[in-house]
Image (spheres, rainbow, N blue to C red):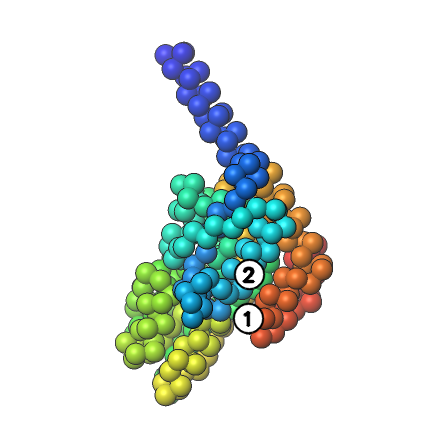
């Protein structure tokens, strides 16, 4: 029994050590595997040649370059971002990952690298100005996102219709399957552009999220490197350049100042 306990303890320590040395493993492999959702424009998407692009992708490219390794994109959807990290399929997550208390129990977050406005939007003419106004109405969301959590917990009497990815949500709204949606401001703008005839408008803001880079729990060495990298690239303006390129506006200076305190 004692021997078995010692063996288990040794294996646990070895597993912990391997996890804690993720940064060394990345450098040794000369490659970092980054979980990115490529169906969340303009943060993650593919171009006309089916090549990855978007603000999250550019952040990943810059991070890999500064680390001196190659970038391997691990395609994901909202619900599989954290499982990809936990199962070792990815080394980090850069994929519109908003901080929540629930997620912080199972992964660690870096200093935020970008903001994300979360909102409820829908067809003009539907009288919705608050959570209370959603009672008796259906709202489309991407499963396991902060919008899903916020609406499930606070929109009493509403029917939350869950899709497996943002592409499904966009299709539902654009084709008229859904008249109300909980999503990010960036994705909602995409819906407005794709379906101008639907007369979509923002109804109210759910929250403004801080987006962090996800790292496995207790992976302190990698997290410290990522935090230093995020701070340095806020100070030199490179993260703001990427954000403005895809989102059309600067990251507010007071928000960056708050993050860097």
Q: How many marks?
A: 2
Residue position for label 2 = 58
Quarter occupied by the N terminus: top left
Residue 52: x and y in percent read 46, 62
Is residue 110 visible in the rendered image? The answer is no
Q: Is residue 27 above or below residue 46?
A: above
Is 56 placed left or right of 136 in the picture? Answer: right
**Which of 184/221 is in front?**
221
How much space separates mark 2 and mark 1, taking CA atoms? 10 Å
Residue in the image at 46% along x and 53% along y: 73
Residue in front for this viewpoint, 127 or 95: 95
Q: Residue furthest front?
A: 49
Q: Label 1: which residue? A: 246
Q: SS at mark 1?
A: helix
Residue 10 at what x, y percent from top left? 46, 20
Residue in the picture at 60% in, 71% down = 244
* Viewport quadrant of the C terminus: bottom right
Task: Mark 2 and mark 1 in contact? Answer it, CB < 8 Å.
Answer: yes
Q: Residue at x 39, y 46 (%)?
A: 83
The image shows residue 201 at horizontal and vertical percentages of 44, 82
């Amino acid at each position: 029994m004692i021997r078995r306990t010692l063996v288990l303890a040794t294996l646990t320590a070895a597993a912990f050590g391997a996890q804690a040395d993720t940064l060394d493993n990345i450098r040794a492999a000369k490659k970092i595997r980054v979980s990115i959702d490529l169906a969340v424009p303009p943060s993650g998407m593919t171009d006309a040649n089916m090549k990855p692009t978007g603000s999250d992708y550019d952040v990943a490219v810059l991070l890999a370059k500064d680390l001196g390794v190659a970038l391997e994109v691990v395609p994901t959807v909202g619900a599989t971002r954290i499982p990809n990290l936990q199962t070792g399929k990815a080394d980090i997550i850069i994929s519109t990952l908003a901080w929540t208390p629930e997620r912080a129990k199972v992964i660690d977050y870096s200093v935020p690298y970008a903001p994300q406005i979360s909102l409820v939007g829908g067809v003009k003419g539907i009288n919705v100005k608050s959570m209370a106004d959603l009672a008796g109405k259906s709202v489309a969301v991407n499963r396991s996102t902060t919008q899903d959590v916020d609406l499930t917990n606070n929109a009493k009497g509403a029917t939350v219709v869950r899709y497996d990815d943002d592409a499904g949500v966009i299709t539902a709204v654009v084709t008229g399957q859904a008249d109300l949606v909980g999503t990010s401001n960036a994705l909602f703008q995409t819906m407005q552009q794709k379906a101008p005839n639907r007369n979509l408008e923002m109804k109210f803001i759910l929250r403004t999220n801080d987006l962090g880079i996800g790292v496995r729990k207790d992976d302190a060495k990698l997290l410290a490197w990522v935090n230093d990298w995020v701070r340095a690239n806020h100070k030199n303006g490179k993260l703001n350049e990427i954000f403005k390129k895809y989102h059309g506006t600067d990251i507010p200076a007071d928000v960056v100042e708050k993050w860097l305190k």
